[in-house]
Image (cartoon, rainbow, N blue to C red):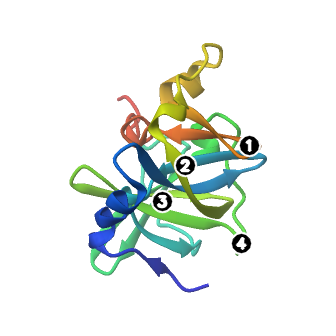
Amino acid sequence: MEALAFKDDMSSGASVAGANSMQLIAFSIGEQTYGVEITTVREIRAWNGATPLPNTREFVRGVINLRGTIVPIFDLRARFGEGVTSPTKNHVVVVMSVGEKWVGILVDAVSDILTVAKTDIHNVPEGNSIDTELLNGIVTHESRMVGLIDLHAVVSGAKMDS
């Protein structure tokens, strides 16, 4: 599987979606569907492993060298407390920009691009503290619920406390 690159001019996609809606890249972890704003996605690539780093939490798979840029890879399944992913050739890494940095998240599969109305985004119900901590909201698209990933929360706490 070749890497699917997104040009930096993807922000123009927001104007296509309109001011009252947003476009998401949707991906799955098991039966759950999650999404991130398309403007944060830089590339989708096949899982080819990562170089492990010392003193990191179990959800940090390591780093990859992406055309000269060192990108940390986070296992989203492990980050949600559902155990470490046993990646296969079918798993993918979604490379995104979080502020000035690039990060990758390991997911089971990328499903599609969704356009959702901003008014359809709901708060995450109280209950599972990991979900409320790592999600910005939930939106219903067709018959499925899509959790909106809070990228800053997902990548925080990667180093183990000394």
In primary-sequence order, the first of circles 2 and 3 is 2
Mark 4 and mark 1 residues within 8 Å of each other at the beta carbon:
no
Quadrant position of residue 143 = top right
Disc 4 versus disc 1: nearer the observer: 1
Residue type at mark 2: give it. Gly
Give coordinates of residue 11: x percent, y percent.
30, 62
Disc 2 crowd, CA 10 A, few/some/many (<14, 14-19, 20+): many
Q: Which residue is mark 2?
A: 35
On screen, residue 127 versus residue 96, left or right, reads: right
Residue 16, percent from left and from top: 38, 62
User: x and y percent of residue 126 in the render?
Assistant: 60, 13
How far, Cα to Cα, is label 2 from label 3?
A: 26 Å
The reply to whether dot 2 and dot 3 touch (C-beta < 8 Å) is: no
Whether the residues at callouts 1 and 3 have beta carbons within 8 Å, the answer is: no
Label 2, secondary structure: give it: strand
- Residue lying farthest top? 126
Residue 47 image point, x, y percent: 59, 71
What type is the residue that disc 1 sits on?
Answer: Arg
User: Who comes first in sequence, dot 4 or dot 1?
Assistant: 4
Which mark is first along the chain, 3 or 1? Answer: 3
SS under mark 1: strand
Task: Using the numbered discs, state the Cα–Cα distance from disc 1 to disc 3 in whole angstroms.
Answer: 35 Å
Q: Quadrant of the C terminus?
A: top left
Outermost residue, bottom side: 2
Q: Which is more N-terminal, label 4 or label 3?
A: 3
User: How far apart are the alpha carbons under marks 3 and 4?
Assistant: 21 Å
Pointer 4 residue: 90
- Read off the residue under disc 3: 52
Q: Amino acid at mark 3?
A: Pro
Q: Are marks 4 and 2 in contact (CB under 8 Å)?
A: no
- Secondary structure beneath disc 4? loop
